[in-house]
Image (cartoon, rainbow, N blue to C red):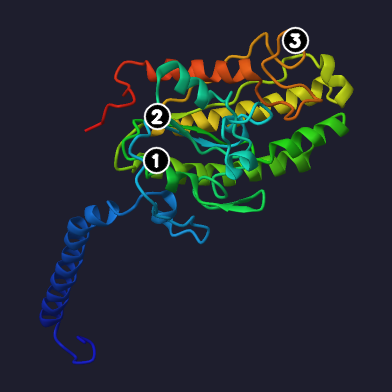
Amino acid sequence: MAGWRRLPLKSTLKLLAAGLVVAEAINVGAIMATTYTAPSLLRQVHSLNDLVGSETQLPHIHPTGKPLRRIQAVVIGDSTAAGAGLAPVTGASNTDRACGRSADSYAADLSATNGWRVLNLACDGATISNGLLGPQQHGGRLLPPQLAVAERAKNASVVIVSVGADDLNWAAMVRYCAITPHCNDRATAAYFQQQLASFSKNYLDLLSRLAALPSHPQVIINRYYDPFGTEPGCLSQAGLTTPSLQTLTSRLQTLNAVLAKGAVQFRFSSPQPDFTGHQLCTSQPYVQGLSAAAPFHPTVLGQLAIALADQAALNQPGALRPGQTGA
């Protein structure tokens, strides 16, 4: 404007100064507006997906149905939590049978030991996106998201989670390691890292939603047990060699590290059951054998070991007991 109007130097400087003042005023106003509105907007963010606007965001499904007021603890997760391969629950429903829920699961152990009403929603093959936060198609049935059902248990003081193996397609990795002497090749290593990255993102979403539960229950994230040990032993008949077991054990440790780190960030407990001396090929295994209904899954004693680890987490100082509230 100064050049177009051929203003003298003094007038040009005045015009530039006025323009600078106006621009800074607008800038400061925008900053102040953002400062005052950001907290209320951030309070609406319950997950990483909400924050970054990912296209793969899992839907927020609100609980429908009557409140489950008499439930004191809830278990959600995969076949490990369901109790796959063990005796079915008494009076099992079609969903219970399809999901492999057992009367010998660690959920049942905790219920029997403490006199709690425990709701076991775990299901064989469940992942975070297809089972916990999203619906799961299983056994010819469309099952509602486990967390949505868990939210109906408004008086539950604890939620226990076992998840991750199916997200990483763990069974397929074990099968691959059984047919190749060295399963730590670049292709499978890259596949594992890709699966782990996807799981980590969904896991953060799950943790965020657990932290946002209105009842503020204690949350326990179970890490996985070691089913193998250090020597192949009886596993050699299935094609698993020492290098293969080392690869599988390393990947299992990586998964457990992700589970533990996420739990710590949200101040959740993350116990790991101790199967030392009771792996698959020992005299008293806590793991179902190769010819069992659910190989590599916990036995009755294995489920009890998981229950004991969870019980210890519940007994930590400051932990809520079922029947107590966090208010």
Instruction: Give the amino acid type for the residue marked by disc 1 in the picture.
Output: Leu
Against 102, is 193 above or below? below
Q: CA distance from mark 2 to mark 3?
A: 33 Å
Q: Are marks 3 and 1 in contact (CB under 8 Å)?
A: no
Q: Which residue of the protein is positioned furthest toward the bottom in this rendering?
A: 5
Residue 106 screen position, x and y as percent: 53, 23
Instruction: Give the amino acid type for the residue marked by disc 3 in the picture.
Output: Thr
Q: Are marks 1 and 2 in contact (CB under 8 Å)?
A: yes
Q: Residue at x 40, y 55 (%)?
A: 50
Residue 215: quarter of image: top left
**Residue 162 appears in the figure:** yes
Q: Residue at x 61, y 29 (%)?
A: 83
Mark 1 lies on residue: 210
Q: Secondary structure at mark 1?
A: helix
Decide which of tag 3 and tag 1 comes sooner along the chain: 1
Q: Residues within 10 Å of mark 1 (few under 14, many from 20)?
A: many
Q: CA distance from mark 1 to mark 2?
A: 10 Å
Q: Residues within 10 Å of mark 2 (few under 14, many from 20)?
A: some
Direction from residue 243 to residue 209 in the image, left or right: left
Mark 2 lies on residue: 268
